[in-house]
Amino acid sequence: MVYKLQRPPPTEPRNAWPGLESERLFDSPMPIIVVGSPAAARRLLGATPEAFAREPLLGDQELWELWFAAAGVRTRVTLVAIFNDVGLMMQAAEQNLGLGLARELLAADALRDGRLLRLSPISITHEQAHPYHLAYPPSLRDWPPLMSLLEWLHDELALSRKSLKRSTAKSRK
């Protein structure tokens, strides 16, 4: 059996997967932040948002354009790599291949572990950033392994949210 951990199509948020049940894992909008490696953080310490435009940028051009607009910077965004998987993009940022934009919750573990650092207090939200769901056949609704997976996913997301709240509280002190 194949289980899909994905976003619903933007045109049909309800009943997006005919014949399947879906469990919403987290909502949007969620802060999208600039992340980079510790080396990038040292290099950009005290830098203005304009300096970010001169760095290798990873990810989605539209999101970077929105971020630079929120930062009050008019610039042409040039990406060095585009990813269809935010996890791969964050790994590239961890390896100091460029700066990335990621949903804060999805980057929580890497932020907590110090593999990635938030490089700017500026964050954006994007109305096209849909919530994530786990979709499955209705016949498996009460299947213990699926119930365990859902419980584990919700527990991990709750731990990530808690970790983010702690790190936010620390950074404000």
Image (tube, grey):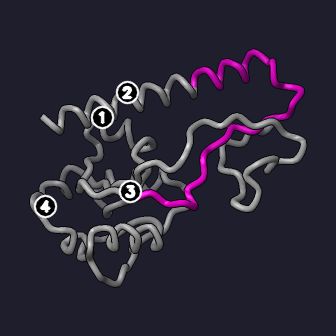
Q: Secondary structure at mark 2?
A: helix
Q: Residue 130, position in %: x, y?
A: 60, 53
Please tell me whether mark 3 or mark 2 is closer to you in this view.
Answer: 2
- Quadrant position of the N terminus in the picture: top right
- Quadrant position of the C terminus in the picture: top left
145 drawn magenta: yes
Please tell me whether mark 2 or mark 4 is closer to you in this view.
Answer: 2
Q: Residue at x 46, y 48 (%)?
A: 30
Residue topped by disc 1: 112
Q: Residue at x 88, y 47 (%)?
A: 18
Residue topped by disc 4: 43
**In contact (CB < 8 Å): disc 4 and disc 1:** no
Q: Amino acid at mark 3?
A: Ala
Residue topped by disc 3: 92
Q: Amino acid at mark 2?
A: Lys
Tell me if mark 1 has few (under 14), some (14-19) or many (20+) residues whose alpha carbon lies within 10 angstroms of its own: some
Answer above or below: position of 35 versus 82: above
Q: Secondary structure at mark 4?
A: helix
Sequence-first disc among 2 and 4 = 4
**In contact (CB < 8 Å): disc 1 and disc 3:** no
How many angstroms separate mark 1 from mark 3 (CA)?
A: 17 Å
Q: Amino acid at mark 1?
A: Arg
